[in-house]
Image (tube, rainbow, N blue to C red):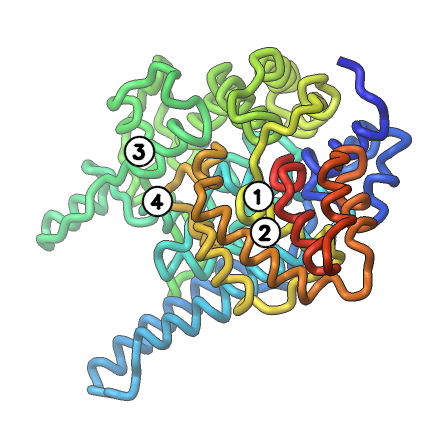
């Protein structure tokens, strides 16, 4: 179906981007596809913070905090409150990281590039459900995700799987092969840590081939054995807080995974498995479905899935080529807005529509919590769900309405909400909503009507 450029430019910015800022739909008007393709770049997505603390620095800070807490406990220091210390670390570290991230999203001129980066950050979820991971979620996204989002998927997979945040989140750092030197030593001392399959399972089930690829529990166990030794350096070791391979913890021997044999190769054994997983047609299909679901519809069009899968296979997993294929696919430009915004998407698009940069994490965090999308805290390694049913329950919509009214009262100023609506939605703005906004009794009421309109809640 051919659509005119007025509508296509609005779709480019509001569906494939993060929502329109003033003048953004006009900027995309002459060549909507070209406007988006120009945002694809080899160096990846922008970084929310310049000169931000690294994951290693955060991890070392956390380990030092643990030692300080233990020393205080042994000394009987009743003034040291570990709960308050933990809360401070979460507030100071995670809060700073999340505020920087939402400010980037609210202000960027490359909305598609940021949405693409956020998609991959959710695909490779690390959740702040543990204190130690909460402090490194922000650096994980900056170090492992954003630099690779338009490069080879294999590089993104290895970078995320070997990052300290992922190793901690899925308990890989302490995994020990049952026949390794470390296991033999533990047997003599009466300790037992053993093999942990969490990361291996999630790489296969969520990150690469998917549950329908036909692998078995034995394949997961063998992959977990191949990954033993992937860990993090301690405070007293060189490169403290960074990835390290512990040969003494690695399970010796060859592995057979999904019908392929992998010779003993130390750290390289798991890398060889990841290389094959990244090249699998099952991975191409799994990723194509997720991309189409995120950008276009909860029930993704099979023709779009097939086109994205073909682009992945033909380019050996070059994500920039996959992104370009998405942009140039007719299904991406269907006039019907089928996606209901998550709370994060709703807030970001509201800030962009009003030309506001959020200033205070203390004002953002309670709103995200109330709407069910706590900052950096996806409920499981699956990440945040896509389906509209999760986000459009009556209570959730009422919370959005309350926030919209309060936000509009502060943000609208002396501006005309009808003009803000035209800037935010372009040709997607229906005559009925435009008329309702124009008839609003006050400017704040007009802006809040825009934010709660069906066109704005969907993309």
Q: Is residue 40 visible?
A: no
Sequence order check, earlier mark of 1 and 3: 1
| Left/right of residue 32 with respect to residue 166 in the rendered view | right
SS type, badge 2: helix
Regarding mark 1 in the picture, which secondary structure is present there?
helix
The answer to which of marks 1 and 4 sits earlier in the sequence is: 1
Mark 3 or mark 2: which is in front?
2
Mark carried by residue 142: 2
Q: Quick check: 411 left or right of 295?
A: right
Distance (Cα) linking label 2 and label 4: 19 Å
Any mark on residue 170, and which? 4
User: Quadrant location of residue 272?
Assistant: top left
Point out residue 112 in the picture as x, y percentages from the top left corner.
70, 38
Q: Are marks 1 and 2 in contact (CB under 8 Å)?
A: yes
Q: What percent of the width, then of the height, locates residue 356?
A: 72, 60
Image: 71 above or below 320: below
Q: Going from the N terminus, do you reach mark 3 or mark 2 first?
A: 2
Which residue is label 3 attached to? Answer: 224
Q: CA distance from mark 1 to mark 3?
A: 23 Å
Question: Which image quadrant is residue 36 in?
Answer: top right
Which of the two residues, 139 or 434, is positioned nearer the viewer here?
A: 434
Q: Residues within 10 Å of mark 2 (few under 14, many from 20)?
A: many
Q: Name the residue tied to disc 1.
A: 145
- Name the quadrant of the C terminus: top right
Circles 2 and 4, Cβ within 8 Å, touching? The answer is: no
Asked if one can make out residue 383 in the rendered structure from this viewpoint, the answer is yes
- Spatial CA distance of label 1 from label 2 is 6 Å
């Amino acid at each position: 179906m051919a659509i005119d450029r007025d509508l296509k430019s609005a779709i480019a910015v509001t569906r494939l981007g993060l929502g329109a800022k003033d003048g953004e739909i006009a900027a995309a008007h002459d060549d909507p596809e070209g406007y988006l393709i120009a945002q694809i770049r080899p160096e990846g997505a922008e970084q929310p913070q310049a000169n931000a603390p690294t994951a290693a620095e955060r991890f070392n800070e956390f380990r030092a905090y643990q030692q300080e807490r233990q020393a205080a406990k042994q000394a009987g220091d009743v003034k040291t409150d570990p709960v308050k210390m933990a809360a401070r670390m979460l507030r100071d570290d995670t809060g700073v990281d999340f505020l920087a991230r939402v400010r980037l999203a609210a202000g960027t001129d490359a909305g598609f590039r940021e949405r693409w980066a956020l998609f991959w950050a959710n695909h490779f979820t690390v959740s702040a459900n543990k204190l130690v991971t909460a402090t490194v979620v922000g650096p994980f996204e900056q170090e492992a995700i954003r630099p690779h989002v338009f490069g080879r998927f294999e590089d993104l997979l290895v970078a995320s799987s070997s990052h300290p945040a992922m190793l901690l989140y899925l308990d890989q750092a302490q995994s020990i092969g049952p026949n390794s030197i470390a296991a033999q030593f533990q047997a003599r001392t009466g300790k037992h840590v053993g093999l942990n399959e969490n990361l291996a399972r999630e790489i296969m089930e969520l990150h690469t081939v998917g549950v329908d690829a036909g692998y078995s529990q034995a394949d997961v166990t063998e992959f977990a054995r191949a990954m033993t030794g992937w860990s993090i350096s301690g405070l007293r070791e060189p490169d403290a807080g960074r990835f390290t391979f512990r040969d003494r913890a690695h399970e010796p021997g060859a592995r057979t995974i999904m019908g392929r044999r992998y010779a003993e190769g130390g750290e390289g054994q798991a890398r060889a498995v990841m290389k094959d997983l990244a090249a699998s047609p099952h991975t191409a299909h799994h990723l194509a479905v997720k991309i189409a679901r995120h950008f276009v519809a909860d029930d993704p069009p099979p023709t779009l899935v097939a086109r994205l899968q073909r682009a992945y296979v033909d380019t050996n997993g070059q994500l920039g080529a996959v992104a370009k294929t998405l942009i140039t696919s007719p299904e991406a430009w269907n006039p019907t807005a089928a996606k209901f915004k998550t709370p994060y998407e709703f807030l970001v698009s509201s800030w962009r529509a009003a030309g506001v940069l959020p200033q205070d994490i203390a004002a953002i965090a309670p709103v995200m919590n109330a709407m069910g999308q706590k900052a950096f805290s996806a409920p499981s390694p699956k990440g945040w769900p896509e389906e509209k049913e999760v986000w459009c329950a009556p209570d959730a919509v009422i919370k959005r309405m309350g926030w919209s009214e309060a936000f509009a009262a502060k943000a609208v100023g002396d501006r005309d909400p009808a003009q803000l609506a035209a800037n935010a939605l372009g040709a997607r703005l229906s005559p009925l909503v435009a008329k309702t906004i124009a008839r609003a009794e006050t400017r704040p009421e007009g802006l809040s009507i825009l934010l709660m309109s069906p066109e704005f809640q969907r993309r």
